[in-house]
Structure formats: structure tokens, C-alpha cells
Image (tube, helix red, strand yellow):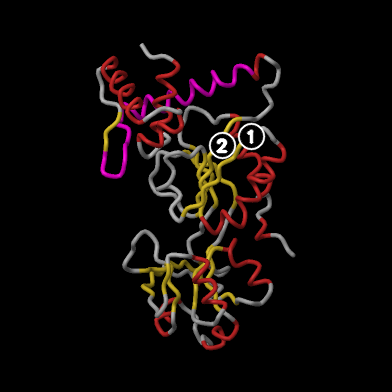
């Protein structure tokens, strides 16, 4: 049999990267957490977690118990509010993980507005260059871009295009460039993501004339400057150092101000939609639903589509 404390234990382990961090969540010592976990495994006759070089991770059986525990504990912990008639009051802690750039510019404002509406809600916002990799303790992950295979459940928040840009001065040097293959003649500012050795930009052509349909093009790009930080390569582009591929949310204001110029407007890069990811199919909690509502309100329409 499992009791309430067992469920809290597996929830803490599932939301942590180590037994030490799980112990802090439960206000216990790491040895006490280890003993309780071992006893639970003995009762269930199944391995729930394994130690690894970088911490601890749940087995498939542990992951299933973790997801069930989240749903059960959410209902139990919401009982006092429902009984007292305060079901609409949002409280507790919400853990949000978001990308550095988009997080600083927009998610901080979403969280600010959310907490003003729900003053008893505590929000822990963690900004990361790889949000899904840092998502073990998250209730919500804000993701920008196409989502690869994932067990997370996506809730669309806003459309977001990728644009090819350069400073006005550098754009003047690209006169005569009319197709992606011409990029080989210019310096491209490369964003290095996920330890990729080669950077490729993918283009599709859009035309009102169906007779002008062209096949998608993939271009291997290179340049004298690269970084894993999008803000850095945007600053290099503003300084006139080359051509950059950036999200619309990041450069829309710069384009409107004339600080950057769009290149190859008839060729389009893959979109990078903004999505909120929730970790299970057991149903969104009150806190998660409150965040989704606040995010959709703030991003409808997306700020980068609004005219100044």
C-alpha cells in the first residue's frame, strides 16, 4: 500500500535531478530519502529510480507512478479550497522554464501579470538555453520552434516566423542576391545549437504565381562569427558584421525602426511557433491553467505583430 507521504516522495524525486534536491523539497536528509525510496520499492516489488552519474532518474514504472501521483496530489491539495468555496483561488508554487531571450523579453511579463492577478501564487521562473533539458522540475516549459518527438503536451500560444536580416549597411553589399544559394558569397552569423557542427538554413519559396513554384532549398552556411547565444548574433548583425537568421519576436522592432533590413523576402524559413508544454496527460492543474490563460491573453495578438 502507498500513503500520502509516498506520493509526495515520488513527486519530489521526479521533479529533482538528485536525491539531495529531492530531500530539500521534503525537508529531509538525503539518507532518509534513500531509505524511504528503498522501502517503497520493496513494498511494490519494482525499481522506481536509478542513480546515474548526473543524478537520479525514474524508471518507466517510476515515471508512471510519478504521473499518477501528480494527479492525485493535485486533487488532494485542492480539497481545502473546494470545500471552503475558494476553488477559484490560485495558490501554491508554479515552476516555469523558458528560453533566455524570449523569457527575458516576454515570459517575465506574463509571470508578472499572472502573479498580480493571483497574489497567493508563487512562481519560480528558470531561464535556460535548453529549456527541455532543464525541465525535470517544471510545471510548464515555454518552447520556441518546431517541437521534436516529446512526451510533453503542447498548447499553442503564438505564431512566430524566422526572418533573414542584416544591417542597412551590410544589406547594400548584398545587392543582386535573389536566391538562397547566393548566401555563400556573404558572411553569415551562425547560431550554434545542440552542439551542431554544421549550420543549415532551410528555405521555401512563396509566390502568388503557381507557375513560379520552386523546390525547397537547404543551404549550408558559414562565416567568421558564430555563437550559442541569439542575442549575441543579433548584436553582431546590428553592427554590420553579416547576415543573421532570427525569430520575428526578436527582430520585429528592429526591422520597424530600420536598424535591420529583411533579405530574400520571397523566400521563407521554417516557422518557430511559441508553445507551452505541460508534462502529462492527466489534466492541467489550476496553476497551469492560470498560466496558459495569462500567456494566451498576453500573446493575443503577439506583441511582435503589433504596430508601435
Packing grade of label 2 (10 A; few <14, some 14-19, many >=20) is many
> Please, is residue 295 above or below residue 188 in the view?
above
Which quarter of the picture shows residue 67? top left
The quarter of the image holding the N terminus is top left
- Relative placement, left or right, of 152 versus 161 is left
**Res. 295 image quadrant:** top right
* Figure check: 145 above or below 62: below
* Frontmost residue, 196 versus 37: 37
Determine whether, in the image, residue 113 is placed left or right of residue 17: right
Please report the residue visible at 55 percent of the width from the left and 78 percent of the height from the top: 166
Q: Give the structural element (helix, strand or loop) at label 2.
A: strand
In-front residue for pair 170/240: 240
Where residue 271 sits in the image (x, y, percent)? Answer: 51, 59
Location of residue 135 in the rendering, given as x and y in whole percent from the top left corner: 44, 43
Residue 16 x, y percent position in the rendering: 40, 37
Residue occupying image coordinates x 60% and y 77%: 261
Where is residue 86 shown, x and y percent of the image?
A: 70, 21
Secondary element type, mark 1: strand
- Quarter of the image where the C terminus is located: bottom right
Q: Is residue 262 left or right of residue 216?
A: right
**Mark 2–mark 1 CB contact (< 8 Å):** yes
Local packing at callout 1 (Cα closer than 10 Å; few below 14, some 14-19, many 20+) is some
Residue underneath mark 2: 94
Image height of 172 relative to 222, above or below: below
Label for residue 63?
none
The residue closer to the viewer here, 285 or 48, is 48
The residue sitting at the right extreme is 308
Residue at image point 48% right, 69% down: 213
- Front position in the image: 54 or 73: 54
Q: Which residues are magenta?
A: 52-80
Q: Is residue 78 magenta?
A: yes
**Magenta region includes residue 3:** no
Amino acid at each position: 500500500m502507498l500513503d500520502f507521504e509516498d506520493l509526495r516522495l515520488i513527486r519530489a524525486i521526479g521533479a529533482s535531478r538528485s536525491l539531495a534536491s529531492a530531500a530539500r523539497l521534503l525537508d529531509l536528509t538525503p539518507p532518509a530519502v534513500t531509505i524511504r525510496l528503498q522501502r517503497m520499492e520493496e513494498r511494490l516489488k519494482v525499481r522506481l529510480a536509478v542513480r546515474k552519474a548526473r543524478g537520479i532518474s525514474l524508471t518507466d514504472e517510476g515515471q508512471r507512478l510519478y504521473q499518477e501521483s501528480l494527479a492525485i496530489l493535485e486533487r488532494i491539495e485542492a480539497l481545502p479550497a473546494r470545500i471552503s468555496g475558494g476553488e477559484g483561488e490560485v495558490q501554491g508554487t508554479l515552476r516555469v522554464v523558458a528560453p533566455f531571450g524570449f523569457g527575458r523579453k516576454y515570459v517575465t511579463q506574463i509571470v508578472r501579470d499572472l502573479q498580480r492577478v493571483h497574489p497567493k501564487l508563487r512562481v519560480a521562473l528558470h531561464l535556460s538555453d535548453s529549456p527541455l533539458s532543464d525541465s525535470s522540475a517544471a510545471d510548464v516549459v515555454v518552447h520556441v520552434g518546431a517541437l521534436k518527438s516529446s512526451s510533453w503536451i503542447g498548447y499553442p500560444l503564438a505564431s512566430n516566423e524566422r526572418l533573414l536580416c542584416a544591417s542597412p549597411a551590410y544589406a547594400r553589399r548584398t545587392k543582386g542576391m535573389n536566391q538562397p544559394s547566393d548566401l555563400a558569397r556573404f558572411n553569415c552569423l551562425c547560431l550554434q545549437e545542440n552542439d551542431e557542427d554544421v549550420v543549415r538554413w532551410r528555405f521555401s519559396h512563396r509566390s502568388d504565381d503557381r507557375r513560379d513554384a520552386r523546390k525547397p532549398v537547404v543551404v549550408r552556411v558559414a562565416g567568421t562569427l558564430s555563437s550559442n547565444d541569439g542575442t549575441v548574433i543579433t548584436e553582431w548583425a546590428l553592427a554590420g558584421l553579416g547576415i543573421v537568421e532570427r525569430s520575428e519576436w526578436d527582430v520585429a522592432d528592429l526591422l520597424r525602426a530600420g536598424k535591420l533590413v529583411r533579405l530574400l523576402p520571397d523566400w521563407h524559413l521554417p516557422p518557430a511557433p511559441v508553445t507551452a508544454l505541460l508534462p502529462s496527460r492527466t489534466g492541467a492543474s489550476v496553476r497551469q491553467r492560470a498560466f496558459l490563460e495569462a500567456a494566451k491573453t498576453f500573446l493575443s495578438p503577439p506583441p511582435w505583430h503589433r504596430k508601435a
